[in-house]
Amino acid sequence: MTITINGEQQSLPQPQTIDQLLISKGFGKNIAVALNGAFIPRTTYGRQVVKDGDAIEIVSPMQGG
């Protein structure tokens, strides 16, 4: 299964939820996720399954001025 994370193609051995993907890739808790261009609420990370061909953007907030 091939997906795109932040513009880079990556292979996954099996379908995973957003939660499982974030843990396996080492992302922390302070992030936002978009799946195929749509924001995904944090409350659905454990139910939302990533499918072959999906594009995921993972961003973390930055402070600055």
Image: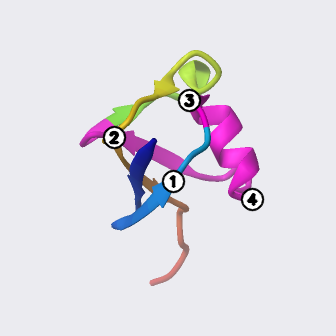
Task: Locate residue 63, reporting x and y percent.
Answer: 55, 74
Q: Answer with mark 1 or mark 4, whichever residue precedes in sequence.
A: 1
Taking the spot 51% from the left edge, 53% from the top edge, the residue there is: 11
Taking the spot 66% from the left edge, 52% from the top edge, the residue there is: 30
Three-letter residue code for mark 1:
Ser
Q: Which residues are magenta?
A: 14-38
Label 4 belongs to which residue? 26
Label 2 belongs to which residue? 54
Task: Locate residue 18, reporting x and y percent.
Answer: 58, 34
Q: Answer with mark 3 or mark 4, whichever residue precedes in sequence.
A: 3
Quarter of the picture holding the N terminus: top left
Label 1 belongs to which residue? 11
Three-letter residue code for mark 4:
Gly
Name the mark nearer the viewer: 3 or 4.
3
- Give above or below for 24 relative to 59: above
Q: Cα distance, mark 1 to mark 4?
A: 16 Å
